[in-house]
Amino acid sequence: VSARNVAVLGATGSIGTSALDVIARHPQRLRASVLAAGSNVAALVELCRQHRPDHAVIADSRGLQALADGLRDAGLKTQPHSGDDALDALVSGDACDTVVAAIVGAAGLPSTLAAARAGKRILLANKESLVLAGELLMQAAQEGGATIVPVDSEHNAIFQCLPDAHAHQGLRRILLTASGGPFRGRARAELTQVTPEQAVAHPKWSMGPKISVDSATLMNKGLEVIEAHHLFGVDGDRIQVLVHPQSLVHSLVEFVDGSTIAQLGLPDMRTALAVGFSWPERIESGVAGLDLLAHGRLDFEPPDLQAFPCLRLAFEALAAGGTAPAVLNAANEVAVSAFLQRRIGFLAIPALVEDTLAALPSTPATSLAALREADAQARHHAGQAVATGAAGARA
Ligand code: NDP
Ligand code: MG
């Protein structure tokens, strides 16, 4: 068998580099054929040196010349590209058969959709694309014949626990675990002064800045509830969130007969990525097995929705349906970016999201255009609130 040709989108990020680590362990089986990043040309060129892909794509066109120069100076045959259209064409064409969708935020939607339409195997990390356009993306994957293997650790765990359609039939509910983030156990009043540095210092996982802040607000778990709804066809009332501080049980499924099945492992994304590359087979990921005696105990507690309202807002947006999840996601992206730039406080993140959801009531999301419009309106509304210090941004 020939090796899988893998396009790693978001190659310079936390998931991208973990994916490349797994790929490099299996030269007979896996090959990085396309590497794509946002604007960090130097890091992209360095990855091209190590992995020698056929194509390298920088989203920001201002980086194209530097990318071309860097590849030439390194003596590489890798072809330089820039822009969304080039990325979509590479993802859709013969350059790859497998796509690691690990761009952060709604920016990952076009390439993930292109991979779905073109029938690729998609290792889906970019949860925002499912939150924004879950129905359209799942439909595109079905019509295009694509295989989506979720690599978000919780969804990868559920995927492993639900091997086939028979299992889906007997499924009663999904138990989604959450680490609780760096501020677990704090009351709302203790969160007013927290800084970006404290928010991104996750106790168990090493991740990019956006998802780290999402973990601190519990919006990450909210996005994951919506993600699970689309991936596994389960409504919000059949998804329970459990705070599990050890982050060893990555999620569980409960069947109608009373069985509960879990997937466990060390908190290292390479396990989920290895599953994504090899499923239904298994390959080495570089991650050690779990020494349960060394860990000793597994704790579970309910989430605190007073201190972390983002999780409640996500359940509400899922129940409202239509454009509400797209609005939730866009307002959250604006709020997280403003928080990381120290323009708003930590508690302003849920306040801004709630304010934006109230200002833009849900309408039916029948087309990609309608969802993009809702996304744009929510970004505009939340951006104005940040700029003017309006209601939500003062919290
Ligand atoms: P990082 O911030 O570490 O990396 C983001 C990547 O996206 C970088 O390679 C960045 O390139 C690239 N990028 C940003 N904007 C664009 C764009 N417009 N076009 C192309 N590429 C772009 O994020 P993570 O790796 O942590 O997260 C990636 C995704 O995976 C997110 O959706 C996250 O929710 C999800 N995820 C992450 C987990 C983790 O453990 N990190 C776990 C589960 C899910 P550049 O370096 O040039 O800016
Ligand atoms: Mg996760």
Image (cartoon, rainbow, N blue to C red):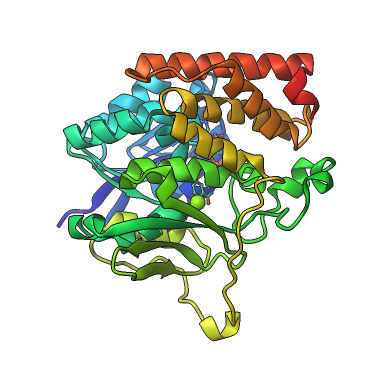
Residue 272 seen in the current view? yes
Q: Is residue 98 left or right of residue 58?
A: left
Q: Is residue 282 above or below residue 82?
A: below
Q: Is residue 180 above or below residue 385?
A: below
Q: Is residue 258 above or below residue 120?
A: below
Residue 37 seen in the current view? no
Q: Is residue 75 left or right of residue 92?
A: right
Expressed as whole percent of the image width and height from the top left, the position of residue 326 reads 48, 26
Identify the image quadrant of residue 350: top right
Q: Residue at x 40, y 29 (%)?
A: 109
State which quarter of the image contains the N terminus.
bottom left
Residue 3 versus residue 206: which sits nearer the camera?
Answer: 206
Q: Is residue 19 left or right of residue 294?
A: left
Q: Is residue 112 left or right of residue 102?
A: left
Expressed as whole percent of the image width and height from the top left, the position of residue 192 reads 82, 40
Identify the image quadrant of residue 76: top left
Q: Residue at x 54, y 13 (%)?
A: 377
Expressed as whole percent of the image width and height from the top left, the position of residue 369 reads 37, 14
Q: Residue at x 70, y 54 (%)?
A: 182
